[in-house]
Amino acid sequence: MNQDLSIFQLVLHASWVVQAVMLLLVGVSISSWAAIFRKLFSLGKVKALNDDFERNFWSGTNMSDLFATAVKNAAHGGPMERIFASGMREFQKLRERRITDSATLMDGARRAMRASFQREMDVIETHLSFLASVGSVSPYVGLFGTVWGIMHAFTGLAALQQVTLATVAPGIAEALVATAIGLFAAIPAVVSYNRFARDIDRIAIRLETFIEEFSNILQRNLSVPQAGAQ
């Protein structure tokens, strides 16, 4: 009995529908863990790059030098650096066109930074919806496998004249494994989604704060012919 009720034996003797559900959930779980680790490393990298750029930004380095460095690091820099480059580029383009109206200059720079902000957030939020889907759908997929397995087990018992716990238990246990695998896939996805969503909100607030601070610096430098030092 112990051998028959081992996890391996339960999966091996389950109906093909339940086995297909288990296989699907295992695949989803592996994909979910891969997405979790990718997101964990990517968010850590984003935070580190933002920290490095913000440290340089507030160190008193000339903005023209920062802009030149940001342009060179466009492919490898952080979100904050690319947002800065977008705003600075638009600001300089408008000034090169002899536009002197402060409202026009600031509106153009802010719109450029906001557009860059939205692009960066789209990239940062990649795979987050997948984790949300895994967390919400996996338990129901597992439950479907359980219901199907129990139905299949009771259908097989209909032909027996005498039914005991020993004859019912294996079929029900086989079906419940599907629910267990569904929960195994869903719980890490839900926990990770909540943590990543909180971290992304903090990154978004930090980037929005930087946009406002940089806008204030540009406003103060409007009287200077070319954007200079902070």
Image: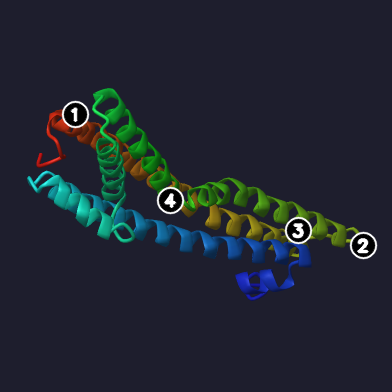
Which residue is most to the bottom? 3
Camera-side mark, 3 or 2: 3
10 Å crowding of disc 1: few (<14), some (14-19), many (20+): some
The structure residue drawn at horizontal position 62% and vertical position 61%, both measured from the top left corner, is 25
According to the picture, the residue beneath numbered tag 4 turns out to be: 123
Q: What coloring was used for the rendering?
A: rainbow
Q: With respect to residue 156, does 138 lie above or below?
A: above
Label 2 sits on a secondary structure element that is loop
Q: Amino acid at mark 3?
A: Gly
Which residue is most to the front? 98
Camera-side mark, 3 or 1: 1
Q: With respect to residue 105, does 181 lie above or below?
A: below
Q: Could you say where residue 42 lies in the image, as x and y percent from the top left? A: 36, 58
Q: With respect to residue 213, does 120 lie above or below?
A: below
According to the picture, the residue beneath numbered tag 3 turns out to be: 149
Q: Amino acid at mark 1?
A: Gln
Depth order, front residue of 115/103: 103
Relative to 211, 192 lies left or right: right
Distance from Cα at disc 3 to Cα at disc 4: 41 Å
Mark 3 or 2 closer to N-term? 3
Question: Are the residues at dot 2 and dot 4 in contact (C-beta closer than 8 Å)?
Answer: no
